[in-house]
Image: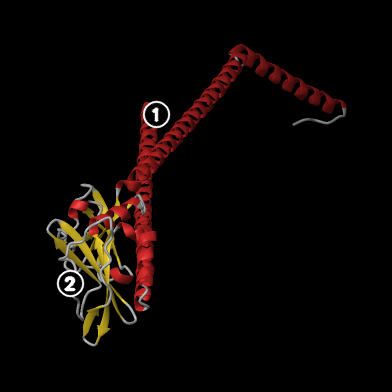
Amino acid sequence: MQQSLFSLKRNRFLIFGLAIICTLVVYLLMFRVIDQRLGEFNTRFLKEISLEKAQLVQKEFDDFERTFQLMGIAADENQQGFINKLIEQGDVSQFILSYSFWKSSGAYFSKEFEWYENPNVSVPTQVASEISNGFKSVKFIQVQSDKYLEVFIKTRTGVLQLILDLNRLNTYVANQKIGMRAYFELYDQDGICLMHPDLARVGEKKKKNFVSYPVKDSTILSEYLILDVIVNEYKLKGIFSENKFFVNVLLLTTQDDVHSISRVSFLLGAIGIGIMLFCMFLMDLQNRKAKRLSLRNLEYQKEDALLRFENLKRKVDPHFLFNALGFIAAVDWERSSASKSFCWKNGESIP
């Protein structure tokens, strides 16, 4: 009996332990799936931020190019006054230092307009230079510590040459706050930085060279933030189409939110498992209580049967049995005597 109870308890603990282990394994797998899905959501969300940043930058550059194209159309019509008004009344006055219109004459270009000089700044004479066929749409120029960007806009009759102050251009773009959750970098074909949130890096060679281009979802340590960022390369349209354009999104942008969701999921899962184990314990306790009641009921029935048997034994004692047998024998003798006397009266003999 004791061995049976011990075996029952051992099986119960074994089943309960296996149930706990299976529950924990399922929970860990579920938590891993949730964590994986949250990671995929985080990556997708970061891509959306990166794409949004690229689109906003493209929109800003499109605004610049529309102004430059209007200036080119005015240059074809010899409307220098209109060009000056476009500069003075527009945002481009913050970074355009001067312009010059070169009219095409075969393989050569001749200067048609005099230089426009922004009254707020002075333009070094070294920046102004002649142009020829095969020029790039954007060219970096550095004169001592000053950094400039030479932009060429092709027109119907020639080329409009613009000189931009790179530091002022970067400051203007930074003040526009184009997407606060990411920053971008722009490099020319020689790897020289043209636009960067850190002005000290403008004009320097790119330090990080990627294995392959275009760069897609590459996680690197940002030299600017000293934090991990996800980098994507996009193709710009217009005058900057030949340059390399990168958008960097800080991984911590959504990491805290993802971790908070993960922690809440883990806590809810732990609470659910705790409630389930508690319910299992209550069910096992209830089952054991029901079994104990069933065993107690059987014991009561056994005791009742024993009591009935003892009562029956007490009633059937030797004297009672002897008297009963004697009474039965006497009754039987009387019956046999009465039968014989009946036969003699009728003249019959009994053998």
150 vs 205, left or right, is right
* Quarter the N terminus occupies: top left
- The residue nearer to you, when weighing 232 against 110, is 110
Q: Earlier in the sequence, mark 1 or mark 2?
A: 1
* Quarter the C terminus occupies: top right
Q: Amino acid at mark 1?
A: Leu
The quarter of the displayed image where residue 325 is located: top right
User: Taking 216 as reference, is 22 above or below it?
Assistant: above
Q: Residues within 10 Å of mark 2 (few under 14, many from 20)?
A: few
* Foreground tag (1 vs 2): 2
Residue at the spot x=74%, y=20% of the render?
331
Outermost left residue: 144
Q: Secondary structure at mark 1?
A: helix
User: Taking 156 as reference, is 84 above or below it?
Assistant: above
Residue 212, image x and y in percent? 20, 67
Residue 128, image x and y in percent? 19, 69
Q: Which residue is mark 1?
A: 5
Residue 90 visible = no
Residue at the spot x=43%, y=38% of the render?
268
- The residue nearer to you, when weighing 19 against 311, is 19
Outermost top residue: 319
Residue 8, image x and y in percent? 39, 33
- Report how far apart the C-alphas of labels 1 and 2 lie in the structure: 103 Å
Q: Secondary structure at mark 2?
A: loop
Q: Which residue is mark 2?
A: 129
253 vs 345, left or right, is left
Q: Amino acid at mark 2?
A: Ser
